[in-house]
Image (cartoon, rainbow, N blue to C red):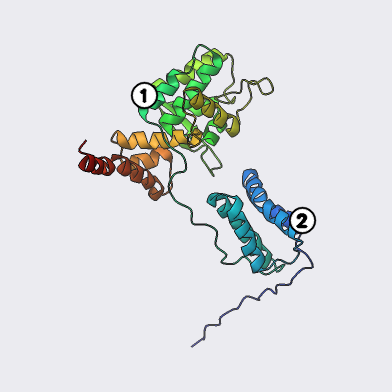
Amino acid sequence: MVEAIQVMEPRRETTVPQTIGPELFNRYIAYLDAKPRTIETYTRTLRPFHRYMARAGITRPTREDILAYREGLRHTCKAATVQAYMLAVRLFFKWTEQEGIYPNVADRVKGENISREHKKDYLGKHQVVDILGHIDTATLTGKRDFAVILLMTTAGLRTIEVSRANIEDMRIHGDGAVLYVQGKGRDEKAELVKVALPVEKAIRDYLKARGAVNANDPLFASNSNKNKGGRMTTRSISRLVKGRLVAAGYSSDRLTAHSLRHTAATINLLEGGTLEETQQLLRHSSINTTMIYLHHIDRDKNPSETRIARAILGA
């Protein structure tokens, strides 16, 4: 009988460098195998820790330093920001330990408990009609903004998906039109969303007014002097939506471009759409994410407060 031999991987020795400074942070960023936007996010969320160390004169951080950094963030940042910054720190020190550069002093240091509730509000169907009614569609900008908001609200699109869309991505599919989108974290335009007939008409009306275009031109183009005809950024699309919301009288900080995605999901469920259909609409990988919308709807339909007030006040 041949005995099984257990092969043990050699253990990497972790050595403590003289300092942890800009050079090491830059080396970590260079090591990352990720998309430019992801690398930009890591850089941005790790930068505050680097500044914290520089201000405090820390060159060999300890677990206590990590905890002190987190405590400082809690006094100046929202919970979601603290979570993002601490995640960046944990990943950085996980890398230093893997590379045998520095011990993982951030191991098991917690971030914040983030609520799974949506941070943005959604609109009712009558409010959407009101916002669209405030847009002057006699102008090219008005035609574009009307089509953008209508598409985002009916198809639940993210700003990045609107920004990436080209004219050629909208195609005829059976009896209607579809738009192939490059979703969040995707490398190609492999997901399709249906474009309802009124939305298709609004988009084609805008494209007709825009004039001669090529198939690979952006579906929605900038009208600014600096970038006229060029691709709109996610930031410019967010400003577009926010401006139209404010112009119609909806100036809440909790109403943004992302609210249109929440609006699409909520209206679909309220109008009889199933949870599975809504998951497909939003292209969620997990149905648990979609279920958050059900909680909001169940709560909105719950008349408990009114019932109690009526019982007490008799009105």
Could you tell me which residue is drawn at 52 percent across and 86 percent down?
3
Percent across and percent down for residue 235 are 59, 33
Q: Is residue 212 above or below residue 78?
A: above
Q: Nearer the viewer, mark 1 or mark 2?
A: 2
Could you tell me which residue is drawn at 48 percent across and 88 percent down?
1
C-alpha span from label 1 to label 2? 58 Å
Q: Is residue 194 visible?
A: no
Image label count: 2
195 left or right of 140?
A: left
Q: Nearer the viewer, residue 60 or 1?
A: 60
Q: From this viewpoint, which residue is outermost toward the top? A: 138
The amino acid type, in three-letter code, at marker 1 is Asp
119 left or right of 223?
A: left
Q: Nearer the viewer, residue 229 or 21?
A: 21
Q: Which mark is residue 22?
A: 2
Q: Is residue 102 visible?
A: yes
Q: Residues within 10 Å of mark 2 (few under 14, many from 20)?
A: few
SS state under label 1: loop
Percent across and percent down for residue 4 are 52, 83
Percent across and percent down for residue 124 are 37, 30
Q: Nearer the viewer, residue 185 or 131?
A: 131
Could you tell me which residue is drawn at 76 percent across and 59 percent down?
21
SS state under label 2: helix
Q: Quadrant of residue 202?
A: top left
Percent across and percent down for residue 79 are 53, 52
Q: From this viewpoint, which residue is outermost toward the bottom? A: 1
Q: Which mark is residue 175?
A: 1
Q: Quadrant of residue 118?
A: top left
Of callouts 1 and 2, the N-terminal one: 2
Q: Residues within 10 Å of mark 1 (few under 14, many from 20)?
A: few
Q: Which mark is residue 120?
A: none
